[in-house]
Image: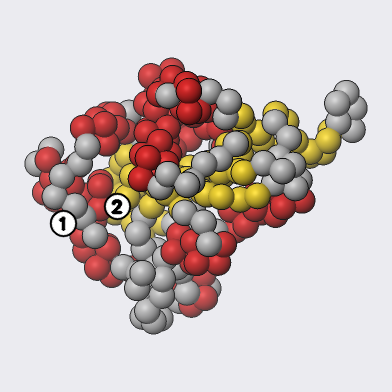
Amino acid sequence: MATDSLPSWKSSLIELALQSNILTFGSYKLKSNRISPYFVNCGLFCRAKLIRAISEAYARELNSYAQEHKEWSFDVLFGPAYKGIPLCATTAEKLASLDEQRWGEVAYSFNRKEVKDHGEGGLMVGESLKGKKVVIIDDVMTAGTAIREAISIIDSQGGKLVGIIVAVDRQEKMPSQSEKDGKGDDGSPRGSTIGEVRREYGVPVMAVLTLGDLIVGMKKMGREEEVKRMEAYYEQYKPTD
């Protein structure tokens, strides 16, 4: 689950998230009713240096995947409203800064929550998705509901989904119905939400940071107590994929 080392940019991002209270430790009740020892509030990547850091991280991850898979490419970054909106715009710019020859023509697009009935009207803002290869960019993936809604929008607009990228992969199994009902985990083996989406749609699902990355980063900082709690949480909820 965890690797022995991290690229320097990942270590720097973890340190920045910790300093900015984006990554915090305590006892947090999730939508799944699980009690997590850590929480990543991606909505707090809202100041200039923070949005720069996270958008550069998305760009690095996308570029790295493209370098490893030469046949893979995309035309549009789609950011689902609302948190995906600043991410798609800033990451598109950072991709061009990273390699303008390769990424200079990448566009961004996002949806409105309510269809506009005046001016240009419509559901979408930015580049048309019709006939385009599209990557969804968002902050987290929990039950996968929001991602499936985004995929439905892409399909309705005539785009082709070729990938998904999120900020954090918690690397835990999907919640059971028993957990959703507040009755606790039934103990059955299950895959992760990201793994399920990957299998269902047959596209790469990337993450800037994983729980394994966070554990390695916190170990480097000597935060052994937090590391023990994250490792115990992983052991309790580790997926089968």
**Number of the front mark, 1 or 2:** 2
Per the image, the residue denoted by label 1 is: 228
Answer yes or no: is residue 46 visible. Answer: no
Q: Residue furthest front?
A: 71
Amino acid type of the residue that numbered disc 1 sits on in the rendered structure: Lys
Identify the colour scheme used. Answer: secondary structure
Amino acid type of the residue that numbered disc 2 sits on in the rendered structure: Leu
Which one is earlier in the sequence, the residue at label 1 or at label 2? 2
With 232 as the anchor, is 41 left or right in this view? right
Q: What residue is rendered at 90% in x and 27% in y?
A: 118
Q: What residue is rendered at 49% in x and 46% in y?
A: 72
Please state the horizontal and vertical placement of residue 117, each as a whole percent of the image.
89, 33
Answer yes or no: is residue 118 visible. Answer: yes
- In the displayed structure, 56 sits above or below 239; it is above
Q: Nearer the viewer, residue 1 or 145?
A: 1
- In the displayed structure, 133 sits above or below 238; it is above
Q: What residue is rendered at 21% in x and 32% in y?
A: 8
Distance from Cα at disc 1 to Cα at disc 2 = 12 Å
Per the image, the residue denoted by label 2 is: 211
Q: Secondary structure at mark 2?
A: helix
With 211 as the anchor, is 136 left or right in this view? right
Crowding near the residue tagged with mark 2, few <14, some 14–19, many ≥20 C-alpha atoms within 10 Å = some
Please state the horizontal and vertical placement of residue 76, each as a whole percent of the image.
61, 36
Q: What residue is rendered at 55% in x and 66% in y?
A: 200
With 169 as the anchor, is 222 left or right in this view? left
Please identify the quadrant where the N terminus is shown.
bottom left
- In the displayed structure, 149 sits above or below 222; it is below
Please state the horizontal and vertical placement of residue 226, each as a whole percent of the image.
19, 49
Please state the horizontal and vertical placement of residue 134, each as a whole percent of the image.
60, 43
